Image: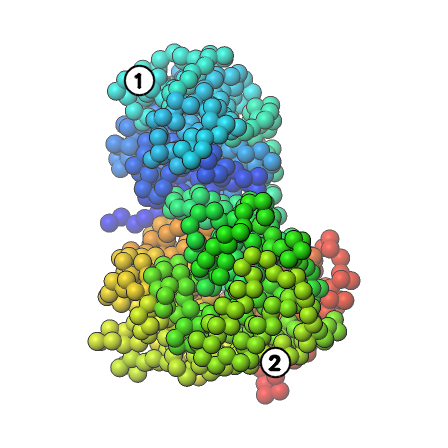
């Protein structure tokens, strides 16, 4: 087998190139803006374009469609004496000859733009097609096509840009595909073809369509096309195909001119440009715009000068937005991490849908995403986070569950009007996790005392029953008995979430699994399943709540909290309930208080008593986990069981010679200090023995259970090594690394990260562009690229743990956990980030290249001014930070020396 060409970084701005990318499968690249334009594009210009589930300009694609479908963006050239040629490389003739070597292609891509250069010496043409979505309010994708005559003779060419216009909902792929084509109304205008269907077809209730889909184009000087084809069947001809259309192959004159209309046919935006004669070396330039609901698009974008200007603006926009920079011994890694930092932004735009592997859902983000995506925002755009977190709290129900249908607007949550929804037992854990990070980064303790509404719909009793009194006229804000919306503090919301979760325990005293936890595929143990893994996280959350309350009392002199009187039941449950049955009864009693309205009455709770109650439950839960959940193998390895199945049987351990172990079951006890250092070391040793596989990126999510566990979840029906059944799942691997760093196991944490990112950066194995995928499959291919929560956690882990640049109650703390191999040849390592609205570059000098554990901070300066080292670290107070300019890059320099007995 010949060696595979790998992508290479070509500069310092994370731009990369890849030779002959079309010789690889499943490659796709995102093009998007914050206005909601969502495209994906492949080396052959396949992919799709949309602004939402019901507004696809191109036909929706999943991963398999990338090689099954003939539909794509295409720029055709008919050359006199030679015939048809596709600048996208997807004519039937070119596809048949793809492996002949007659044609070469090169991809160049940056943040977020895409260029494919294709050269065919036999045909005498070189094409360069650059595509991007401008950082404007327009939902438009732009492309510039440059055609160069590389032959020694004049070339007469007739250019045609063509893209089928699907123009409707993704639902119509398998629901009335033909019938919905009858709704199409297509018109040829001066610069292109516009499609506006008459209605949105939905048998549950049709509605008037208000979306317009346009394919517009011009020559580089702004001259419009000469004519058009508006219907697919006219363009391809009888017996023709999209990769060998008769309109091009036979060089037919365009059927449509300005003003032409067509109704009831599958549409295409095929723009015929006037015939061009190119001398040897001469170029012709064309600009194309694909837009949904565009206004003044031709005037704004359709010339080479305008295209180039908006491209440069867009490049600058993304470079500024992605403002975390690293300098380590590995330049390739530093640039690769720039792509990782882009992924949380992409996920806010795309949600968890709308890329080829993400062929599920209807767009938007899930509950976890709302909170975890804020992690990266806290590092890159912290000024936006406070209000986002506050609005997110409005999605919490008073019974501790949350809305699962999330609207497009801030704080918009939609009532469930269908079947009773699933309850994910981990959902209540993530808000506190992010709020705690926010308060440490900002010092904004007052945030906890802001008052917010609670979400209300027909679901009650934690999703187990329906409120028959609720209707749409009630709205989605919980009311008091006086029919006014109830307002509770943010800290009240967080207490309710975590306290209700900790009373919802199963037979073994662990929190009930419900319909799943973080692992969505553990979805078949709703009655008796328990998640020991997330019991550990909730244990940590109780301790975090106590710490926040202590700080509130100390800094803000808050001695009592005004909380809903109904919460007394939760506090009584924490204090009095000893058995799982008793805890469930207290939970039921609490949920019964909010079946429709709540009283609206508040009472004062002493902060000291709340702290004592939370700490007591946390301690009891931690002891229960460590004493009851240790398992071992006959080889002598020890770890913690993570789950109980629907038969109330322990999931992990060794049974009939088969070792069963999950990574999740180890991550959270380590992360939240449920396990002590000795047990943690044993758990890492077991993970290295049973879960680590360097050939597929590191730590697998679980061992092979060799059983179809219908009493636990669908994951056990998946082939082993794929998705949740034993793949290397990036998110959990990185949380494992984060947990290890938190506990001081920096070498072990780095191993988890390094193995994963080296695999992703090895194109021959991973077959993905720079960035981190959701998981790596059994063959080593990266899957579900660009939209994983792993990206936020990787940035968090590197910035706050490895580089040790983090907030503590609003102060900036610098305390590294870098390894010797991360320092460059001069012993330097650096990271740039935003903190307190100021830009910082922290530079570590380690001239002896000492390893973590061997060095200590010996000297620190801020902008050349000496700073005091306390307790082995640099700490800049809020007062010091606020005195600094917002307009300059502040340099922190740290000198590391060999640690001595006094350090």
Residue 850: image location, x then y, percent: 53, 75
Mark 1: give few (<14), some (14-19) or many (20+) Cα within 10 Å: some
Please say which color scheme the image uses: rainbow
Mark whose residue sits in front, 1 or 2: 2
| Residue at point 21%, 76% (across, down) | 656
| Residue at point 46%, 72% (across, down) | 584
Q: In the structure shown, which secondary structural element does the residue marked by tag 1 occupy?
A: loop
In the rendered structure, find residue 64 and report the number of the disc placed on it. Answer: none
Residue 712: image location, x then y, percent: 32, 64
Inter-mark Cα distance, 1 to 2: 78 Å
- Is 40 on the left-hand or right-hand side of 140? left
- Is 780 on the left-hand or right-hand side of 677? left
User: On the image, which quarter does residue 437 sit in?
Assistant: bottom right
In depth, the one of 86 and 205 nearer the eye is: 205
In the rendered structure, find residue 612 and report the number of the disc placed on it. Answer: 2
Q: Which residue is mark 1?
A: 237
Residue 136: image location, x then y, percent: 60, 36
In depth, the one of 473 and 440 nearer the eye is: 473
Mark 2: give few (<14), some (14-19) or many (20+) Cα within 10 Å: few
Is residue 635 visible in the rendered image? The answer is yes
- Is 72 on the left-hand or right-hand side of 577? left
């Amino acid at each position: 087998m010949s060696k595979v060409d790998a992508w290479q970084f070509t500069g310092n701005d994370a731009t990369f190139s890849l030779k002959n990318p079309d010789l690889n499968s499943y490659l796709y690249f995102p093009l998007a803006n914050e206005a909601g334009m969502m495209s994906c594009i492949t080396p052959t210009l396949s992919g799709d374009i949309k602004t939402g589930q019901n507004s696809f300009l191109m036909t929706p694609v999943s991963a398999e469609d990338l090689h099954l479908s003939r539909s794509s963006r295409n720029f055709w050239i008919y050359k006199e004496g030679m015939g048809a040629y596709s600048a996208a490389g997807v004519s039937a003739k070119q596809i048949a000859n793809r492996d002949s070597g007659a044609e070469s292609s090169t991809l160049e891509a940056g943040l977020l733009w895409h260029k494919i250069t294709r050269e065919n010496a036999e045909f005498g043409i070189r094409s360069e097609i650059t595509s991007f979505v401008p950082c404007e309010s327009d939902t438009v994708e732009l492309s510039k096509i440059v055609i160069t005559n590389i032959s020694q003779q004049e070339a007469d060419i007739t250019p045609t840009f063509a893209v089928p216009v699907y123009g409707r909902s993704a639902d119509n792929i398998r629901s009335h595909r033909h019938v919905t084509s009858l709704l199409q109304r297509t018109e040829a205008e001066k610069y292109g073809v516009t499609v506006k269907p008459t209605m949105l077809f939905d048998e549950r209730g049709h509605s008037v369509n208000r979306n317009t889909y346009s394919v517009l184009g011009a020559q580089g000087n702004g001259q419009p096309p000469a004519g058009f084809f508006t219907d697919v069947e006219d363009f391809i001809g009888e017996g023709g195909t999209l990769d060998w259309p008769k309109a091009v192959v036979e060089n037919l004159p365009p059927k449509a001119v300005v003003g032409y209309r067509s109704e009831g046919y599958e549409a295409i935006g095929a723009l015929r440009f006037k015939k061009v004669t190119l001398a040897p070396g001469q170029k012709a330039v064309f600009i194309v715009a694909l837009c949904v609901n565009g206004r003044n698009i031709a005037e704004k974008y359709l010339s080479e000068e305008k295209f180039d200007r908006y491209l440069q603006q867009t490049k600058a926009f993304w470079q500024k937005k992605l403002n975390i920079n690293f300098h380590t011994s590995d330049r390739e890694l530093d640039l690769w991490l720039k792509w990782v930092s882009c992924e949380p932004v992409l996920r806010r735009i795309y949600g968890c849908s709308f890329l080829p592997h993400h062929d599920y859902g209807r767009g938007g983000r899930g509950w976890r995403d709302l909170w975890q995506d804020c992690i990266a925002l806290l590092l890159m755009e912290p000024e936006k986070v406070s209000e986002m977190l506050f609005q997110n709290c409005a999605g919490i129900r008073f019974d501790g569950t949350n809305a699962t249908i999330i609207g497009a607007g801030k704080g918009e949550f939609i009532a469930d009007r269908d079947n009773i929804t699933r309850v994910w037992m981990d959902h209540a854990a993530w808000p506190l996790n992010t709020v705690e990070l926010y308060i440490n980064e900002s010092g904004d303790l007052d945030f906890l005392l802001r008052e917010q509404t609670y979400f209300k719909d027909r679901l009650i009793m934690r999703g187990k029953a329906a409120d028959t009194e609720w209707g749409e006229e009630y709205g989605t804000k919980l009311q008091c008995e006086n029919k006014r919306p109830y307002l509770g503090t943010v800290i009240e919301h967080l207490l309710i979430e975590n306290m209700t979760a900790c009373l919802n325990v199963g037979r073994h005293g662990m929190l009930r699994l419900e319909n799943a936890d973080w692992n969505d595929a553990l979805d078949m143990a709703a009655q008796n399943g328990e998640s020991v893994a997330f019991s550990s996280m909730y244990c940590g959350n109780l301790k975090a709540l106590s710490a926040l309350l202590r700080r509130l009392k100390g800094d803000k002199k808050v001695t009592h909290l005004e909380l809903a009187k109904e919460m007394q039941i939760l506090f009584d449950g924490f204090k009095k309930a000893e058995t799982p049955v008793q805890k469930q009864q207290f939970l039921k009693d609490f949920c019964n208080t909010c079946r429709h309205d709540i009283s609206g009455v508040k009472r004062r709770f002493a902060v000291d008593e709340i702290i004592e109650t939370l700490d007591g439950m946390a301690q009891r839960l931690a002891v229960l986990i460590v004493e009851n959940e240790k398992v071992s193998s006959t080889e002598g390895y020890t770890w913690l069981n993570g789950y109980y199945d629907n038969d109330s049987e322990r999931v992990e351990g060794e049974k009939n010679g088969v070792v069963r172990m999950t990574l999740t079951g180890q991550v959270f006890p380590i992360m939240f200090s449920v396990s002590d250092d000795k047990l943690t070391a044993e758990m890492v040793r077991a993970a290295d023995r049973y879960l680590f596989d360097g050939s597929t990126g590191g730590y697998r999510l679980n061992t092979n259970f060799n059983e179809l566990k219908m009493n636990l979840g669908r994951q056990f029906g998946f082939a082993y090594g794929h998705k949740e059944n034993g793949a290397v799942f990036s998110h959990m691997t990185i949380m494992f690394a984060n947990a290890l760093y938190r506990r001081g196991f920096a070498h072990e944490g780095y191993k988890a990260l390094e193995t994963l990112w080296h695999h992703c950066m090895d194109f021959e194995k991973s077959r993905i562009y720079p960035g981190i995928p959701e998981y790596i499959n059994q063959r080593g291919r990266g899957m579900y690229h660009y939209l994983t929560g792993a990206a936020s956690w990787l940035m968090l882990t590197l910035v706050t743990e490895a580089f040790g640049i983090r907030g503590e109650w609003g102060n900036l703390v610098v305390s590294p956990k870098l390894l010797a191999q991360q320092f460059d040849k001069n012993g330097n390592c650096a990271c740039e980030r935003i903190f307190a609205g100021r830009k910082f570059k922290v530079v570590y000098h380690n001239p002896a290249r000492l390893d973590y554990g061997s060095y200590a901070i010996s000297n620190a300066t801020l902008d050349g001014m000496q700073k005091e080292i306390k307790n082995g670290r640099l700490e800049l107070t809020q007062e010091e930070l606020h005195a600094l300019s917002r307009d300059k890059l502040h340099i922190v320099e740290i000198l590391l020396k060999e640690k001595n007995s006094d350090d």
